[in-house]
Amino acid sequence: MKRYALLLSMLLIGQTALADDDDAKPVIVELSNLLPPPPAAGSIAAQHDLQVVLATQQTRTAADMAAAKADTERSVFRFADVLGPGLQPKVLPKTAAFFERTADFDKDAVKEAKNYWLRPRPAEVSTQVHPLAKEKPNDWSYPSGHSTFGYTTAVLLANMLPEKRAAIFARADLYAQHRIVMGAHFPSDVEAGHLAGTVIAADIMQDPSWKQDYEAARLELRHALGLPANPARTTSTDDH
C-alpha cells in the first residue's frame, strides 16, 4: 500500500509538471512516461505474476467465471450493483455519454502504453493458462485496459457520489480482479491499471474541457439516485 501511494503521488506530480509547462494546451496522458515498467521476462516478479494467474485459474468457480465474463463490458453501468437500480442508461443519457467519452480517452492512453511495452498476455507466456476468452491480436497485456477504465470510473464516480465511495472502490477492485480470473492479465497489469486510471481521472477532473460534461453527469446521476445536488460535508466515507 505504501509503495502504491508513493508511486501514485509521483505520477500525479509528474502530470502537474507537464501541465504547468504550457497551460494553453490540454495535458496528454502518456502512460509510458508515467508508469513503472512491467516485470522483466524470466524475473522472479514475472514468475510470481504467472503463479498468481495459475492459482486463480485453479480456484475460480462457475460463479467467478460468469461474473468475470460479465465484467468484460467496459461500462459505468457495471457499477449498478453497488449504486442501486437507478443507475440505468435509459434514464442517464448524460452520464452514459460522459463515461463513453471517458472510455475512449482511456483506450487511447492505454493503447500507447501497451504498444510501448509489448508485454505478452498470460496465455502467450504459458500454455498452462486457459483464458476464458480470446483476446484481439496485438492487444498487449500491460497495463490492463479494463482495470484502467474501472479505476478511472471509480475515481470519477467517487467524486460525484462521495457517500458511496467505499462501495465504488470495492467494486472497481473486483472489476479489475476479474481480469486475472479471465486469464487475460497478470496482477502487475492490474496494478498498473489502478495507477493509470487514477492519473487519468485526476487529469479529467483538472481539464476545463471536461468540466461541463462532468457536472452534467454528476447532477443527473445524483438526481437519479435520489441524492441532493450537493452532498453534505462529512468525514465519513461509509455507504448509506
Image (tube, helix red, strand yellow):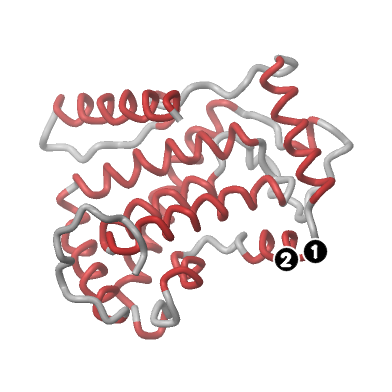
Q: Name which residue lies at 53% across and 21% down.
A: 37
Q: Residue at x 88, y 36 (%)?
A: 127
Residues packed near mark 1 inside 10 Å, few (<14), some (14 to 19) or many (20 plus): few
Residues 101 and 36: in front is 36
Quick check: 179 above or below 238?
above
Q: Is residue 200 left or right of residue 206?
A: right
> Quick one: quadrant of the C terminus?
bottom left
Going by the picture, which residue comes out furthest to the right? 128
Residue 227 image label: none
Question: Residue 66 bears which disc, if any?
Answer: 2
Q: Mark 2 and 1 residues: CB-CB less than 8 Å, in contact?
A: yes
Number of numbered discs on residues: 2
Q: Position of residue 34 (x, y in %)?
A: 39, 26
Residue depicted at x 20% and y 70%: 216
What residue occupies the far bottom of the structure in this picture?
90
Q: Nearer the viewer, residue 7 or 130?
A: 7
Residue 134 against residue 17 in the figure, above or below = below
- Indicate the quadrant where residue 65 lies: bottom right
Residue placed at 44% from the left, 49% from the top?
151
154 sits left or right of 117 in the view:
left
Q: Position of residue 148 (x, y in %)?
A: 48, 45
Residue 22 higher or lower than 75, as above or below:
above
Identify the secondary structure beneath mark 1: helix
Residue 215: x percent and y percent? 19, 65
Q: Amino acid at mark 1?
A: Ala
Q: What residue type is disc 2 on? A: Ala
Which residue corresponds to mark 1? 62
Q: Secondary structure at mark 2?
A: helix
Up-down relation of residue 102 to residue 223 (above or below): above
Work out which residue is located at the far left of the displayed protein and give it: 24
